[in-house]
Amino acid sequence: MMVYFLCLVLMTMGLYCLVAKKNIVKKVLGIVIMDYAVNLYIIVIGYKTGGVAPIVEPGMSEGMYARFVDPLPQALVLTSIVIGLGVLALMVSMCVRLYEKHGTFDMSAISKLRG
Amino acid sequence: MESITPQLYALLVFMIVGSVIAIETRNLLSAVISVSAVGFALSVAFLFLGAPDIAITQLVVEVLVLIILIRGTILIDNTAIETHRDTLAVVSSLIFFGLLLGFGAMIFASEGFPEFGEPLMRVSKVYVQTGLPATYAANIVTAVILDFRAYDTLGEATVLFASILGALALLRRDGKVSRREVATA
Amino acid sequence: MKGMTLIVRTITDFVVGFIVVFGTYIVLYGHLTPGGGFAGGVIIACAFILLLLAHGKEVAFSKLGENTAHFLDSAGALVFLLLGWVGMSAGWFFMNTLPRGEQFSLFSSGMILPANIAIAFKVGSSLFLAFSALAIFRRRSFRAVIEEELT
C-alpha cells in the first residue's frame, strides 16, 4: 500500500507546482510530473509478484502464462506517454508566444486584462 | 521469486526528492534537468515492473522532452524570480492536498482494494490466453493495442495529430506578413 | 540556424545511419519483441532532429523536406484509418483480415505489421515537424515586436 501512496504523493506534488507557482514554465513542469506519476500508478496496479514481461517465446509451456503481468495497463500507458509528448510540444509553443507578446514568464503580469 | 519492493521504494523516494528540487529551485535550467532525472528513474522503474515496451518508449520520449524544454524556454529567462508570494493560494492548496492525501490513504487501506502484486485481471485473462493463437503476435501488448483494442489507438493517433497541428499553427509567422500585404494593396 | 562544431558534425555523420536502422528494426519487429510503432517512430524522429541540430536546417530539410513531412504525417494517419475500413469488409471495424503467416516470423499476424509502419511514419514525421518549427522560430526581441505592432 505504501507504493500506491507514494505515487499519490508524487502526483500531489506535481499538482501543487501547477497551482501555487507563478512562473509559467514551472506550471508546465508540474504537468509533466503529474503525467509521470499517473503513468507509474497505472503500471503499478498491473504488477504481479514475481511476474515476467508479457512476451511469449517459442517453446513456452501453457503454465508460464500465469506468471505474466497484466498487459492491459501497459497498453493504456503506451499511448498516454506519446500523447504527453504531443501536449508538451503545444504547451511550450504557447509559452514561447506568450513570452514574445508580454516579455515575461510571470503569470500575474500576464493575466492582468488590458484595454 | 524475490520481491522488487525495496528497489521500487528507492526509485520512488528518488523521484520525490527530484521533484521537490524541481519545484523549489529558482534556476529554470536546474528545474528542467531535475524533471528529466525523474523521467529517467521512471524508465528504470518500468523495467523493474516487467514492462520493457513502456521503458523503451519512456526513455526516448524523455530525451525529446528534455530537448524541447531546453530549446523552448531556457535561452531567454534563466531564473524564476517571484516578486511576491501568493499566500492564499499556497495555504489553501496545502490544506486541500492534505485532505486529498488523507482520503487516498483511507482508500488504499480499505478492504476491497487489491493488494500490490495481485491484480484482478478479469479482462486480461482472455487476452493472455488467446493472444498468441488468435493474432499470431508474440508481444501481447502489441496484440492488445493493435488487434483487440485498435479503436483506442485510432483515438490516440487523432489526439497526437491535433496537438501537433495546434503547435505548428501557433509557431507560424506567415499570418502577419500576408495581413500587412493585404492592407497595403 | 547554424550547426555545431566539427567534432559534433563528424560523429553525427557516423551515427545517424545506425539510429535510423535501429528505429526501423524496432518498428518492424514490434509484434515479436518489445517496441512497436510508437517507440520506433520517436527514434527515427530523433535521428532527423540530430541532423537538424548538428548541421543546420538546410541539410536537414534537404534530407526530409517540410512538404514531404506534412504528407507523410497525414498519409500515416489515413492509412491507419483505411486499415480499419478494410477490416470492416469482413466483419467488424478493425478486424484482422490479412493472412497470418506462421508464428514467430516477421511477416505474420495480419494487419499488425502495416499498422505499425503507418504509426511510425505518423509519429516520426509529426514530431520532427514540431521540433523544427520550434527550433527555427526566430526569437525577436520584445522591442521589435512593439515597433512592428505600432507601424
Image (cartoon, coloured by chain):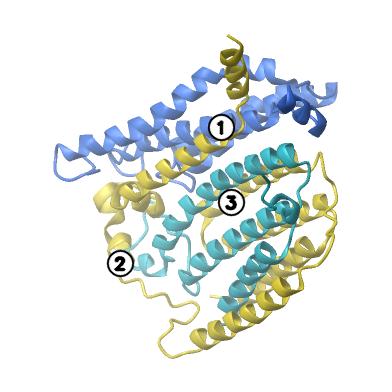
For disc 1, the neighbor class at 10 Å (few under 14, some 14 to 19, many from 20) is: many
Image quadrant assignment for residue B10? bottom right
Position of C31 with respect to B127 (left or right) is: right
Numbered tag placed on residue C85 in the rendering? none
Chain under label 1? B
Numbered tag placed on residue B168 in the rendering? 1
**Pointer 3 with pointer 1, Cβ within 8 A:** no
**Which label's residue is closer to the chain start, 3 or 1?**
3
* Nearer to us in this view, B124 or B182: B182
Give the residue type at disc 3: Gln
CA gap between label 3 and label 1 equals 24 Å
Chain under label 3? B
Chain under label 2? B
Q: Colour of chain A?
A: cyan
Return the residue at label 2: B123
CA gap between label 1 and label 2 equals 39 Å
Any idea which chain is the blue one in this picture?
Answer: C
Q: Are marks 2 and 3 on the same chain?
A: yes
Mark toward the viewer: 1 or 2: 1
Position of residue C30 measured from the top left corner of the image (x, y, whole percent): 44, 42
Extreme left residue here?
C90
Mark toward the viewer: 3 or 1: 1
Give the residue type at disc 2: Val
Numbered tag placed on residue B58 in the rendering? 3
